[in-house]
Amino acid sequence: MERLCLLFLFILAPSLCLSEEVKEPFVAGTGPDGVQRAEVAGGSYYFKPERIVVRVNQPVELRLRNESLITPHDFILKAPEAGIDISVTLRNEPAAVKFTPAKTGVYTFYCGRRFLFFKSHRAQGMEGAVEVVE
């Protein structure tokens, strides 16, 4: 019994105390046409990247795709105060959505799917944010 306790203290306990990795935001690149672009992949309860930085009053194009072969996901970004209203089903083939953010701020996007009595995909961590800056 004492050996099991030592095993827990020295091997298992440190892994339980590790904090989540801090992920750097993705700054959308601007093409020669002035459109800011980013690719967003959704999969088993994640979005990559989780945080996208764009500039206010400049057009944005997000290319969205589903990395999951079986589980359906969607991408919802509702920020009427910033002129953003997106709700699309993710497909395996990338699809583009376009908007022009009219106000700075941080706006949450998420997957709204839920299967029967399970937690929603959003509750399982499938959300991110678009940060609109000057």
Image (tube, rainbow, N blue to C red):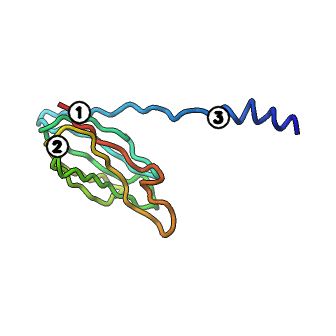
Residue annotated with mark 2: 101
Q: Residue at x 16, y 40 (%)?
A: 103
Residue closer to the observer: 44 or 94: 44
Residue closer to the observer: 62 or 18: 18
Structural crowding at the residue carrying mark 2, measured as other residues with C-alpha within 10 Å and reported as few (<14), some (14–19) or many (≥20): many
Q: Residue at x 38, y 48 (%)?
A: 127
Instruction: Please tell me which of labels 1 and 2 falls first in the chain.
Output: 1
Q: Amino acid at mark 1?
A: Gly
Q: Quadrant of the N terminus?
A: top right
Structural crowding at the residue carrying mark 1, measured as other residues with C-alpha within 10 Å and reported as few (<14), some (14–19) or many (≥20): some
Q: Which mark is residue 15?
A: 3
CB atoms of marks 2 and 3 within 8 Å? no
Q: Residue at x 31, y 47 (%)?
A: 108
Q: Amino acid at mark 2?
A: Pro
Structural crowding at the residue carrying mark 3, measured as other residues with C-alpha within 10 Å and reported as few (<14), some (14–19) or many (≥20): few
CB atoms of marks 3 and 1 within 8 Å? no
- Determine the secondary structure under disc 2: loop
* Figure quadrant of residue 3: top right
CB atoms of marks 1 and 2 within 8 Å? no
* Figure quadrant of residue 72: bottom left
Q: Position of residue 75 (x, y in %)?
A: 32, 54
- Determine the secondary structure under disc 1: strand
Compared with residue 86, is residue 51 higher up or lower down, i.e. above or below?
Answer: above
Compared with residue 111, is residue 33 higher up or lower down, i.e. above or below?
Answer: above
Q: Position of residue 69 (x, y in %)?
A: 45, 58
Q: Position of residue 67 (x, y in %)?
A: 42, 51
How many tags in the picture?
3
Instruction: Please tell me which of labels 3 and 1 falls first in the chain.
Output: 3
Whole-number angstrom distance, CA of label 3 to CA of label 1 = 36 Å
Q: Amino acid at mark 3?
A: Ser
Whole-number angstrom distance, CA of label 1 to CA of label 2 = 15 Å
- Determine the secondary structure under disc 3: helix
